[in-house]
Amino acid sequence: MTTGFWQQAKAVSGRDLLRERRRGDVLWITIPFGAIALLLVPLAVGTDAALLREIGPGMYWVIVMLFGVLVAVGKASSETLPQQDASLLLGLDPAAGFVGRSGAATLLLLIFEVVVGVVAVGLYDISIIGIPWLIFTLLTAAIGLALLGTLTGSIVNSTSAGTALVPLLVAPLSVPLLLGATQSYEGLRLGHSIVSWILLMVVVVLVVAIIGVLTARPLQET
Amino acid sequence: MTSVHFRTVTETPLVELSGVGVRIGSTQILRDVDLQITAGEVVGLFGANGAGKTTMLRLIATLIRPAQGQGTVLGADLSSAERYDVRRRIGMIGHVPGLYPELTLGENLRYSARVAGVPTERAGEALGAVGLAGAADRRAGASSHGMQRRTEFARELMIDRSLLLLDEPHSALDRDAVDLVEGLIERKAAEGGAVVVVSHDRDRINAIAHRSVELAGGTLT
């Protein structure tokens, strides 16, 4: 009896979410730190409401990008060698493992985005506009960051350079996501078209997804 | 040396290594390894710490590629993509458990069943077979080393394997569990599979293995 790609991805996703539910890394550590980081900005720049409203969306996305990638990298590199070996000897397709881990990280990042978003709206008095596009942007950013973090985690696991590589790998691909997310909100606020920014984010998501799936097996082997 | 032969060994080779070397980073771990393991055979693998025993098991498990020489496992070339297709037929229990400590013993087995494509009901049956039916809801991280090892043996019972690779299978196990492990080894050999057992306990392994090989300095002697 063989098992399908998506069944394996679902099993890996379920495993990671269950592990997270028991460990609580995102819920009890990452989310509070993200909220604290948002709280520190007004302490640094003052309480000028107009200024905070202006920089609020940008600060929110910077926090989401930084913490988001750390969450996904952490999840992707949290398996020990015996655990990885055991999964591979169950016949786990490394590409299904990549998709499954990314799926779990996407859900965790969505929770992070929503909770930290509520804090940002409260602290910076950010207007919520263009809700369907906003939801699409949040979802695309979560998927993109999850894929990027999972890919980076896989690379970190497969090389002796360890976490020193993370900033070099993450920066080039997270910048288009950050630009796309912040400029989409800005476009919605000013009534401009945001299609090009959304497309930029979607292209980044697709590129990282393709690279992740195609390199899953070679990275597992090194 | 006492030796118990569970069945007549056939000549079907499940593992064939010829002049194989393995390099990890800049270190040559294995060199010029020649080994053939046939169906129905139980092979003991001995060696001092750092001799390359674990690397040897991971090589046979297709988890690392040879840097030199040629090898096939279950008919798949170790240097080609064929090896991915046979992995599900290879079981390995290392000396460090590969369970997820946050999950219960039952959840660990059900995850294994889902990935391997076997019915999840088998997880409960397998836990029962290793005497852990009442411990299914216990977290792996809160279970003793012996219970974790039993759970790993349960995984191997649950999935149909042709080749079993066991690293110090008797460690941390009580007498009942040792009987269970030796029963599993006997059954696997009788079914036409093969078992490689790494151990420092020569007497115990010599009693169950058809033959033994020794690794010294990365080479089989």
Image (cartoon, rainbow, N blue to C red):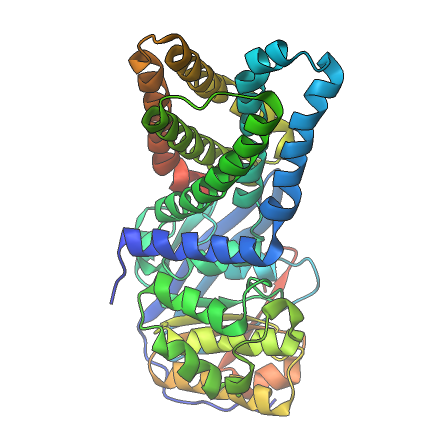
Q: Nearer the viewer, residue A131 or B145?
A: A131
Task: Write the residue at 62% across / 10% down.
Answer: A51
Q: Is residue A151 above or below residue A43?
A: below
Q: Is residue A192 above or below residue B212?
A: above
Task: Write the residue at 56% across / 11% down.
Answer: A54
**Would you say A2 lies left or right of A169 here?**
left
Q: Is residue A176 above or below residue A209?
A: above
Q: Is residue A92 visible?
A: no
Q: What x and y, as percent, mark residue A92?
A: 37, 55
Q: Is residue A186 above or below residue B143?
A: above
Task: Write the residue at 55% across / 53% down.
Answer: A20
Task: Write the residue at 52% across / 62% down.
Answer: B57
**Would you say A18 lies left or right of B190 here?**
right
Q: Is residue B123 visible?
A: yes
Q: Nearer the viewer, residue B87 or B9?
A: B87
Q: What x and y, as percent, mark residue B113?
A: 38, 68
Among the 4 quarters of the image, the one containing residue B7: bottom left
**Would you say A92 lies left or right of A57 here?**
left
Q: What x and y, as percent, mark residue B123?
A: 41, 76
Among the 4 quarters of the image, the one containing residue A2: bottom left
On the rendered image, what quadrant is the N terminus of chain A found in? bottom left
Q: Nearer the viewer, residue B101 or A61?
A: A61
Q: What x and y, as percent, mark residue B43?
A: 50, 75
Q: How many circles with numbers are drawn on the protein?
A: 0
Q: Nearer the viewer, residue A177 or B46?
A: A177
